[in-house]
Amino acid sequence: MSADTHILLRQLIDGKLPDEHGFFGPFGGRFVPETLVPALERFERGARDALQDGAFKTELRQHQETWIGRPTPLMYAPRLSESWKAHVWLKREDLAHTGAHKINNALGQALIAKRIGAQHVVAETGAGQHGVATAAACARVGLPAIVYMGAKDVERQAPNVVRMRRMGAEVRPVTAGDATLRAAVDEAIRHWVGDPQGTHYILGSAVGPHPFPWIVREFQKVIGVESRTQMLEQAWKLPDIAVACVGGGSNAIGFFHGFLGDAHVELHGAEAGGIGPAVGQHAATMSGGTPGVLHGARSMLLQDGDGQVSNTHSVSAGLDYPAIGPEHALLAHVGRVKYHAVRDDEAITALDELCRLEGILPAAEPAHALALAKRLCEGRDDPTVLVNVCGRGDKDMPILTRLAEQEGQ
Amino acid sequence: MRAHEIISKAITDGREAHGVALVAYVTAGFPSMDAFPTILADACVHADVVEVGIPFSNPIADGGSLQETARQALKGGATMHKIMHVLRELDGTLAAPLLLMGYLNPLLAYGLDRLAGDAQAAGVHGVIVPDLPLEAIDMARSLTDAGLATIGMVSPVTSDERLKRIAERASGFVYAVTSVGVTGQQRSDQSQITGYLQKVRSAATIPVCAGFGIRSKQHVDALRGACDGVIVGSALMEAVGEGRAIGPILQGLR
């Protein structure tokens, strides 16, 4: 590790990043049209103010305990452990209210939106989990919500669309572009550009212009903080390996932050390897990307030589995104986290294994983390591994049903 | 005269000759790379400055019309390299100075240093980058050093203090976005626009051009006297999409 990367890692661990302009070393920033700058500044001020306010923290903790169901359990997985020849621990974010970690951030941002006087909320969603979380959080705090969702995702995550509408959110399908998460983010930003003063945009991942990557991490850090404490209480040790899936990277950034300072804990991110390494077949940004600017931040990006953003594919809508949070780009840059591509079929096999051995149906997204964790355990002597199961798989029923039909079951 | 001064002068001259200067926006490669040179040349005859739009896959500040032009241009194989090649071929034949207008990522992929080096040979006098904010303007230093105009964009929601800093850093002209929203939509209330443009003009020592949602002669006439130039984009590209020539449309806006 060079002196520069060492300093950057130290600054990250000490909570000194992002810097005042929103940069994590060479990544991050605020590359947005001028119309959005005042709204981002207002949101940043509101968020800093809230996070230092004891009353806000108490209110947030009450919501977390009684409405989300925090802390979520840490669970030992005996049969999976036997299969993998390892000690496997699972952080059960799938048991959080609405079925995924997304609620941690959606609730936090909805509370801030209310504080800064936003009249309504707009959000994007891929798998639908952030959309459902936003719909629920907005119902809870009393703000109208509009959720943009790629038309392709509306179809493959249909149950979540019904859930959002039941909770009073308006779901707007986006047919532009590749009709997935990227197009939904484009449209949510355009909506916000049209009403930056009345609208708050609850961005669901650790991507986008400053302060989003920072505030999303702050609200997701609870996963890592709880996991670390629970490992010490229940396993009496920290894991050798900790694994999370990464699309934009919100669950992973919160999870990793609990262990950044524990140098002996290996951190690994599972990216969507799709059906192969060719352009358009996957969404493995770290494995196949180059630095670029998309949706307001400089980070790693799947793009062609002309700077046009590539189309992506993944069985999991939540990982189907051509960029990654800027803090992840830095964590890879300094070598603290390693990112690996995991193919669709590997993820589905891992999903089945968790169903059959532990009676847990994970979402297709954390199924990537499970597949990677199993791979990392191979050839090691009795490792202790911790996987963040960031969401449950009920929303994937349409795609699992189709797969079952293809297999003739 | 440096490139950014040529842009400023073209706007001032246009205002003096016609009451208000006319800036035309043309998406490069729309409806096709073959048709683009003729459309561009036509625009240059009838406008004082022409913006050449670099298509991008994720144009977050654009409304439906310009999104569609970018999509078609990319589908037709428009790339930064091809566009610069066409502009080099046309250099010396065009009646107006050019600006490149594009989102940051395609420009970064091409290389800002490289652009600083080969802009002049392509008749490019400056850039407008909607997602390059004041805080990151130093990224464009090589362009500024080469004398190119770095057009500063301000919005009705920009604070007075920030407006002052953007106007100070801008060269060529200040692009005053007249509506809060994406390109091609309805504009805000006229009296609000006039007051806002007055504020921008008093903060700037270079010309001020108004853009976003300017679609008709009526819109242009309403801005006469309130700013130095007007920028027309979506309305022009919609006409191109319908197969109409843009010369008469630009003439009709004067």
Image (cartoon, helix red, strand yellow):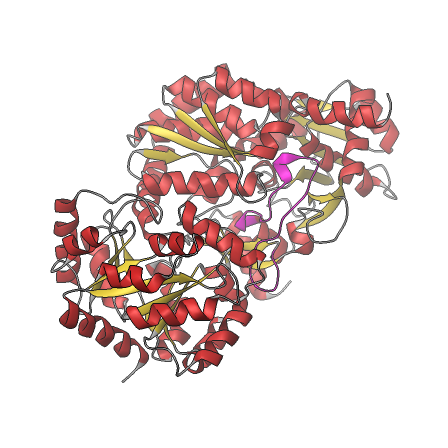
Is A368 part of what is drawn in magenta?
Answer: no
x 50%, y 70%: residue: B83
Asked whether the viewer can see residue B82, the reply is yes
- Residue A67 appears at what percent x and percent y? 49, 16
x 28%, y 59%: residue: B231
What is the total number of numbered labels drawn onto the structure image? 0
Q: What stretch is highlighted in magenta?
A: A303-327
Asked whether the viewer can see residue A96, the reply is no
Asked whether, in this view, residue B114 is left or right of residue A324, the answer is left
Magenta segment's dominant SS is loop
The image quadrant of residue A107 is top left
x 78%, y 22%: residue: A355
Where is A360 relative to B205, above or below? above
> What quarter of the picture does the C terminus of chain A occupy?
top right
The image quadrant of residue A92 is top right
Asked whether, in this view, residue B168 is left or right of residue B117, the answer is left
Viewer-nearest residue: A228 or A365: A365
Asked whether, in this view, residue A247 is left or right of residue A169, the answer is right
Viewer-nearest residue: B60 or A127: B60
> What quarter of the picture does the N terminus of chain A occupy?
bottom right
Asked whether, in this view, residue B65 is left or right of residue A70, the answer is left
- Residue B35 appears at what percent x and percent y? 49, 66
x 42%, y 81%: residue: B91
- Residue A32 appears at what percent x and percent y? 39, 52
- Residue A168 appears at what percent x and percent y? 44, 18
Is A320 part of what is drawn in magenta?
Answer: yes
The image quadrant of residue B205 is bottom left
